[in-house]
Image (cartoon, grey):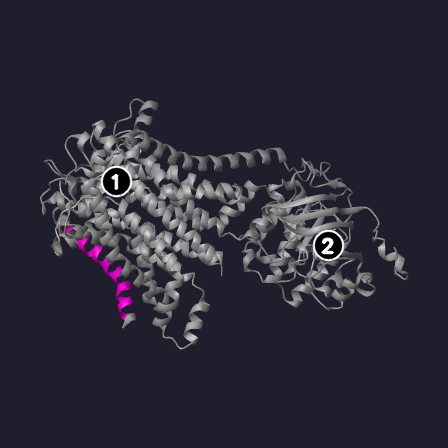
C-alpha cells in the first residue's frame, strides 16, 4: 500500500486499492430531473473494509450510497448513468433484479426505523420473505448478539421494537440487516440521531462486523470516519474530491479542499 | 442460556469468507441450502398484486364513465330551454324543472346564510379560543358523531323541530334549517382544518404587537385561512344541493306548479324531482330524470371544480 | 363577548345532538308503549299497514344487512386497492388523473346513484341472471358499494400516506418486493386507519337512503336471496313519510323507533372509527 505522498507528481494519480472489490462505481452520474447530484464518481470499495463517505451536507454522499443498492429507484425522476459493479457485475444492467440486489446489499438508515412490531419479527421478517430455511430462534439470537443487543433484549423479544431506546433501535436495525447475511451493508449516517454513548457502541460494533461484511458508511462526523474507517472518500458538490486510506486523507490530504474540510474550515 | 457458537453453525453467519458470486437475476446463494428465495413465485405474486390494485382503480374509473355515459345518452336530447323553464307535468314530454331549480337555488342560499356563520364561528371557537378541556373533547367527539348520523335522521329531527315545534310547515325555511344542521359538522371540520394550517408564527406575531385574541383572529388568522374555509364551505353547500332524504322527510313537494316566493312557501328541489321521476316506471319519465341529473351534476361539477381550483391555487400560494 | 358568541356556535352542535336523541326518543316512547321492545327487536314479521299489524323489525334489518354486506364486499377491498395503487404503484401523472375521478364520484348525489342502479345495474344483473327482480338488494348493494368507494379510497390513501417512508424503505432494503412491503409492512402499519375507513363506510352504507329506496324495493322480508325485493330501515322511513299516514298513528310512530335503531347503530360505528383514527394519528406522529 502506498503510504505517504512526498512528491507532488503523485497527486494526479487516483488511489488504487487492491482487489477484490465488493462495490465499484465507474463514472457514476446521478441526477434528480435537471439537478445533478453526483458527478462522474469513480470509487472502488475493497472487500471487508469500512469505507467512509464524508463531505458537507448536500454533497451527494447519501445519493451515491443509495444508488449502490438501487434504493433511489423509489425517487421520482432520479436517473443514474455509469456503472455500479457489485462483485464485478453491473447492478444497473438490464435484467438486474433490484430486489435480489437489495437482499445482498443491506442498508441501515439515518433514523432508526424498526417495523412497528415485535423485536423478534423485526429480525425474522426479511429472512422469512426471502425463504430462509434454517432455525429462526438461532438466527434471532445470533443476529442480536452480533449487533451487541442480545444482552439487553434477550428476555423481551416479543415486545415492540419501538419500545427500545434510540440507540437500541438502531442496533436492532443493524441486527435486522445482519440477519439477511448480506455481502455489503450500506449505512446512511447511522449515528446522527443518537447520543454519544450509543454512537460509541455502534462504532465498536462496526469494527467487529467488518471481518464478515463490507461496510460503506456515510457520515458528517469526521472523528467517526477517522475512528472506524479504513478508507475515506471526500465528496464536495457532487464530485469525489479525494479517496484514499483514512490516515492519509486526514493527515496528508492531497487536495486543498480536503485539507480545508478535514481541518474544519467549512462544512 | 448456553453460549452459542458465533463462528459457525446452521445460521450461515459463519466468520469464514465465502467468495460467492453475486447473482443479479435472483438465484443468489445457489450453493446454499439455507435460502430458498423463490424469486419466480414472488415476482408472480408481485405482478398479480399490482394487477389487482390496478383493477380496483379501473373499477372506480369505469363506474364514473359508465354512469356519465348512461345519464348523457338518456338525458342529453331531452335538455332544452323548455325543460328548464316548464313546471312538472303529468305528461312526461312537457315536464320541466323550473320549480325544482328555483327551489334548489333558494334553499342553498338560505342554507348558506344560516350554516356558514354558525359553522365557521364554532370552528373558530374550537380552534382559536377553547382550552383543551374535557368540554372541548366532548364537543369534538360530538361533531365527529354528528358527521356520521344518517341524513334521514336529520330529516326526522327537522320534521319534529322545524315543521312541528317551530310550526314552519313544509316550507323552504324548514328545509333550509334542516339542511343547515346536516352540513354544519362538515363546515366545522373543514374550517378547523383550514385554521390549523395557519402557522403559529402569524398568531404570535400579532399577539406580540399587543393585539387581542379576537383582533388577531379577525385581522390575520381568518384572512389567511379564508381560501381553505371557502373551499370547505362550497363543498358542503354542494352536498346540501344534492341531498334528498331529509327534504323528503320534512315533506317537500314532488309536484309544484309555482315558484316559491317567500321562505314560508312550499317548495321542491332538483333531487326530489329526479327521485320522483326515477321511481316512475314509464321510460319517458326516466329520460326526464336523466335530463334533470344532467342539470344537477352540471351545477355541482361547476361549483366543485371552482372549489378544487381554489384549493390548488391556495396550496401553491401557501408554501410556508 | 365575541368569545361567548362563538362558544354558543360550538355549543349548538351539542344541542343538535341532544335534540335528535330527545325528539326521537319522545316519539319512540309512544310506540314502545304499544309494542314491546322485545317484540320490536326480535319479531320476524313487519306488517305495519295491514291488520293484523306486526312490528318485528328483523325483516328490515335483513334488507339493510344485505345492502350493507354487499356494499362492503364491493367497496372495501376496491377502496383499499385504490389507496395502495395510488401510493405504491401509480406514477404521479396517473395519480393526478385518478384523484379527481374519485372526487367527482364522491360528489355525485345519492339520488343519482339510485337512478344508476335502476337504469343500468338492475338491467345488467337481469341480463346475467333472468330471475333477478326489478327491485333487488344486489343492485342496491352494488351501487352503495360504488358510492362508499371514493370515501374508503381517500381515507385509506391518507392512512397509507401516514406510514413513515423510512419504514417502507427498511422493507425494501431487506430485499422485499413492492407487494410484500405493501401487504406486510404498509397495511399493518396503517391498519387502524384502514379499519376506521371501513367502519365509516359500513356506517354510511347502513344509513344510506335514496339509492336504496329506489333500487331495493319496499318488500320487508327475511330472505337469503339477494336478488329479491327487500326493504331497508331507511326505505321504510321514506315510505311512511311520503305516504299519507296520519300523524299520531302507530305506523307513524314506528318510524321513530326505526330511526332510533338507525341512530344507535351508526353512532356505534362512528365512535369506533373515531377512536381508531385517534389511535392511528398518535402512532403516525
- The residues colored magenta run C3-29
Query: In x, y percent, where is residue C248?
Result: 9, 47
In this rendering, position of residue C200 left or right of residue B113: right
In this orientation, does residue B132 appear? no
Q: What element carries label 2?
A: strand
Look at the picture and state if B210 lies above or below A260: below
In this rendering, position of residue C214 left or right of residue A117: left
Look at the picture and state if A258 lies above or below C47: below
Tell me the crowding category of disc 1: few under 14, some 14 to 19, or many 20 or more residues within 10 angstroms, Cα based. many
Look at the picture and state if A162 lies above or below B217: above
Between residue A45 and residue A56, name the one nearer to us: A56
Look at the picture and state if C222 lies above or below A66: above
Q: Which mark, by number, is residue A239?
A: 2
- Examine the residues drawn in magenta and state their main secondary structure: helix
Instruction: Confirm whether the magenta stretch covers residue A85.
Output: no
Residue lying at the far front in this picture: please name it. B81
Q: Name the residue under label 1.
A: C210
> Which quadrant, please, contains the N terminus of chain B?
bottom right
Amino acid at each position: 500500500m502506498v503510504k505517504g505522498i512526498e512528491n507532488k507528481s503523485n497527486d494526479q494519480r487516483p488511489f488504487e486499492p487492491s482487489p477484490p472489490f465488493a462495490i465499484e462505481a465507474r463514472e457514476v452520474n446521478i441526477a434528480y430531473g435537471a439537478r445533478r447530484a453526483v458527478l462522474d464518481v469513480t470509487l472502488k470499495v475493497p472487500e471487508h473494509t469500512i469505507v467512509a463517505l464524508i463531505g458537507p451536507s448536500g454533497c451527494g454522499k447519501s445519493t451515491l450510497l443509495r444508488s449502490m443498492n438501487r434504493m433511489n429507484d423509489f425517487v421520482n425522476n432520479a436517473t443514474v448513468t455509469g456503472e455500479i459493479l457489485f462483485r464485478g457485475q453491473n447492478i444497473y444492467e438490464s435484467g438486474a433484479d433490484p430486489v435480489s440486489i437489495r437482499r445482498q446489499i443491506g442498508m441501515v438508515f439515518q433514523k432508526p426505523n424498526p417495523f412497528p412490531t415485535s423485536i423478534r419479527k423485526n429480525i425474522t421478517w426479511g429472512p422469512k420473505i426471502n425463504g430462509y430455511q434454517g432455525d429462526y430462534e438461532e438466527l434471532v439470537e445470533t443476529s442480536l448478539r452480533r449487533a451487541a443487543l442480545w444482552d439487553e433484549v434477550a428476555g423481551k423479544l416479543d415486545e415492540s421494537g419501538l419500545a427500545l431506546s434510540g440507540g437500541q433501535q438502531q442496533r436492532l436495525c443493524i441486527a435486522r440487516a445482519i440477519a439477511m447475511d448480506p455481502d455489503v451493508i450500506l449505512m446512511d449516517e447511522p449515528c446522527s440521531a443518537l447520543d454519544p454513548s450509543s454512537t460509541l457502541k455502534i462504532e465498536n460494533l462496526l469494527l467487529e462486523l467488518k471481518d464478515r461484511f463490507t461496510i460503506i458508511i456515510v457520515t458528517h462526523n469526521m472523528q467517526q470516519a477517522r475512528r472506524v474507517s479504513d478508507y475515506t472518500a471526500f465528496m464536495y458538490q457532487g464530485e469525489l474530491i479525494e479517496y484514499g486510506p483514512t490516515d492519509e486523507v486526514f493527515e496528508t490530504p492531497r487536495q486543498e479542499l480536503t485539507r480545508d474540510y478535514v481541518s474544519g474550515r467549512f462544512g | 442460556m448456553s453460549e452459542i457458537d458465533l463462528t459457525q453453525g446452521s445460521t450461515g453467519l459463519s466468520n469464514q469468507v465465502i467468495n460467492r458470486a453475486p447473482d443479479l437475476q435472483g438465484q443468489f446463494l445457489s450453493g446454499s441450502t439455507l435460502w430458498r428465495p423463490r424469486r419466480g413465485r414472488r415476482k408472480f405474486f408481485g405482478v398479480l398484486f399490482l394487477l389487482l390494485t390496478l383493477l380496483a382503480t379501473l373499477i372506480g374509473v369505469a363506474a364514473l364513465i359508465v354512469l356519465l355515459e348512461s345519464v348523457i345518452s338518456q338525458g342529453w336530447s331531452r335538455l332544452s330551454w323548455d325543460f328548464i323553464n316548464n313546471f312538472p307535468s303529468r305528461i312526461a314530454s312537457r315536464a320541466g324543472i323550473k320549480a325544482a331549480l328555483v327551489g334548489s337555488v333558494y334553499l342553498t342560499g338560505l342554507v348558506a346564510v344560516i350554516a356558514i356563520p354558525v359553522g365557521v364561528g364554532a370552528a373558530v371557537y374550537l380552534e382559536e379560543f377553547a382550552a383543551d378541556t374535557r368540554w372541548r373533547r366532548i364537543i369534538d367527539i360530538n361533531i365527529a358523531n354528528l358527521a356520521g348520523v344518517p341524513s334521514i335522521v336529520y330529516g326526522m329531527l327537522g320534521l319534529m323541530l322545524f315543521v312541528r315545534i317551530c310550526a314552519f310547515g313544509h316550507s323552504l325555511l324548514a328545509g333550509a334549517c334542516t339542511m343547515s344542521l346536516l352540513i354544519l359538522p362538515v363546515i366545522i371540520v373543514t374550517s378547523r382544518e383550514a385554521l390549523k394550517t395557519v402557522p403559529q408564527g402569524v398568531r404570535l406575531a400579532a399577539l406580540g404587537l399587543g393585539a387581542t385574541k379576537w383582533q388577531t383572529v379577525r385581522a390575520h388568522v381568518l384572512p389567511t385561512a379564508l381560501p381553505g374555509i371557502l373551499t370547505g364551505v362550497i363543498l358542503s353547500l354542494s352536498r346540501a344541493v344534492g341531498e334528498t332524504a331529509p327534504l323528503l322527510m320534512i315533506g317537500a313537494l314532488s309536484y309544484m306548479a309555482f315558484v316559491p316566493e317567500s321562505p314560508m312557501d312550499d317548495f321542491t328541489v332538483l333531487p326530489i324531482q329526479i327521485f320522483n321521476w326515477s321511481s316512475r316506471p314509464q321510460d319517458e319519465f326516466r329520460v326526464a330524470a336523466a335530463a334533470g341529473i344532467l342539470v344537477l351534476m352540471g351545477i355541482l361539477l361547476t361549483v366543485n371544480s371552482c372549489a378544487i381550483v381554489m384549493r390548488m391555487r391556495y396550496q401553491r400560494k401557501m408554501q410556508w | 363577548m365575541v368569545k361567548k358568541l362563538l362558544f354558543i356556535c360550538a355549543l349548538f352542535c351539542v344541542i343538535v345532538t341532544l335534540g335528535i336523541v330527545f325528539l326521537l326518543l319522545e316519539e319512540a316512547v309512544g310506540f314502545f308503549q304499544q309494542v314491546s321492545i322485545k317484540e320490536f327487536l326480535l319479531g320476524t314479521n313487519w306488517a305495519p299497514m295491514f291488520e293484523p299489524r306486526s312490528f318485528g323489525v328483523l325483516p328490515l334489518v335483513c334488507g339493510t344487512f344485505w345492502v350493507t354486506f354487499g356494499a362492503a364486499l364491493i367497496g372495501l377491498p376496491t377502496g383499499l386497492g385504490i389507496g395502495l395503487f395510488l401510493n405504491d404503484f401509480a406514477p404521479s401523472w396517473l395519480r393526478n388523473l385518478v384523484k379527481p375521478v374519485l372526487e367527482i364520484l364522491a360528489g355525485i348525489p345519492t339520488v343519482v346513484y339510485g337512478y344508476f342502479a335502476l337504469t343500468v345495474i338492475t338491467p345488467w344483473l337481469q341480463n346475467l341472471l333472468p330471475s333477478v327482480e326489478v327491485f333487488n338488494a344486489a343492485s342496491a348493494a352494488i351501487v352503495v358499494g360504488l358510492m362508499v368507494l371514493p370515501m374508503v379510497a381517500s381515507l385509506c390513501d391518507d392512512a397509507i400516506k401516514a406510514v413513515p417512508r423510512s419504514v417502507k424503505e427498511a422493507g425494501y432494503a431487506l430485499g422485499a418486493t413492492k407487494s410484500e412491503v405493501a401487504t406486510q409492512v404498509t397495511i399493518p402499519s396503517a391498519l387502524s386507519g384502514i379499519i376506521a375507513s371501513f367502519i365509516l363506510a359500513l356506517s354510511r352504507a347502513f344509513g344510506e337512503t335514496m339509492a336504496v329506496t329506489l333500487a331495493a324495493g319496499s318488500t320487508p322480508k327475511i330472505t337469503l336471496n339477494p336478488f329479491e325485493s327487500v326493504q331497508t330501515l331507511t326505505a321504510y322511513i321514506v315510505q311512511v313519510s311520503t305516504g299519507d299516514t296520519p300523524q299520531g298513528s302507530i305506523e307513524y310512530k314506528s318510524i321513530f323507533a326505526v330511526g332510533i335503531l338507525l341512530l344507535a347503530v351508526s353512532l356505534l360505528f362512528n365512535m369506533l372509527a373515531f377512536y381508531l383514527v385517534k389511535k392511528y394519528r398518535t402512532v403516525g406522529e
